[in-house]
Image: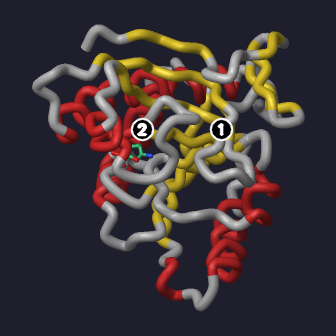
Amino acid sequence: MKADPVEPARIVVLISGSGSNMLAIAEACAKQDIDGEILAVISNKPDAQGLDKAKEAGIVTQVVDHKDYGTREEFDAHLMRAIDEYTPDAVVLAGFMRILTPDFVRRYKGKLLNIHPSLLPKYKGLSTHQRAIDAGDKEHGVTVHFVTEDLDGGPNILQAVVPVHESDDAEALRLRIQAQEHIIYPIGVKWFIEGRLQLSKGDVYFDDKLLPESGIRLNSDA
Ligand code: GRF
């Protein structure tokens, strides 16, 4: 939720890769669908393509390279310092491929969001699309969730459900799911910025109503 109801919300986005979700959120901010501004995009990888996308969109970028630090704790301490320069209302993980320390998660708890390419709690971790295909799942999807100390543990805010076709390989499924990511992540960030989402004792409330474990589910025919 915004610290100042007049100023646009202050958002910091963390990336490691292509930054397409970051861009979807930046575009929603530019269109004022989200009453917020991405003040900085921070990457742990100096060659992340998303850094170029952010620069092209006129957003400040910064690299905190995990390879420069001996331990996870040291890296996270520097990352927190970099983030705190911007006094963010929301810290948005968008393809940020680092496991975060409990200290980091606690610091931003309640304003730390992530997107994970599965219908959590199913398929935490990596290779989610292949795992859904291998399991013969008829549906798969993507989840926007608050981040807690439990890795990919939710709790869930919003999911997009996508049918799995007989002909799908992991790449085909990934592409259809990513199209949904670009729809639901800006929605999740918008709701958060508007103060409609609350994390309380591990549960998510939307407009003061407790959400089910899945979060709000949107179906896609894609
Ligand atoms: C997305 O598939 C997201 O679900 C996962 O990492 C990927 C990031 O893609 N957490 P991008 O960098 O936003 O293009």
Considering every residue shown, the one lying at the far bottom of the view is 70
**Quarter of the view holding residue 174:** top left
Picture quadrant of ligand 1: top left
Residue 11 vs residue 30, the one in the foreground: 11
**Classed neighbour count for the residue bearing mark 2: other residues with Cα under 10 Å, few (<14), some (14–19), many (≥20):** many
CA gap between label 2 and label 1 equals 12 Å
Image coords of residue 81 (percent x, y): 71, 70
On screen, 21 above or below 97?
above
Image coords of residue 58 (percent x, y): 40, 48
Type of residue at label 2? Answer: Pro
On screen, 8 above or below 123?
above
Residue 10 visible in the snapshot: no
Q: Which mark is residue 63?
A: none
Residue depicted at 63% across the width and 41% down the height: 113
Residue depicted at 47% across the width and 23% down the height: 184
By what rule are the colours in the image chosen?
Answer: secondary structure
Residue depicted at 32% across the width and 19% down the height: 138
Quarter of the figure that contains the N terminus: top right
In the image: residue 200, left or right of residue 177: right
Q: Mark 1 — residue?
A: 154
Type of residue at label 1? Answer: Gly
Q: Mark 2 — residue?
A: 117
Considering every residue shown, the one lying at the far right of the view is 201
Q: Is mark 2 within 8 Å of ligand 1?
A: yes
Q: Earlier in the sequence, mark 2 or mark 1?
A: 2
Residue 142 vs residue 198, the one in the foreground: 142
Residue depicted at 88% across the width and 35% down the height: 201
Image coords of residue 215 (percent x, y): 63, 20
Quarter of the figure that contains the C terminus: top left
Q: Is mark 1 within 8 Å of ligand 1?
A: no
Disc 2, SS: loop
Residue 143 vs residue 16, the one in the foreground: 143
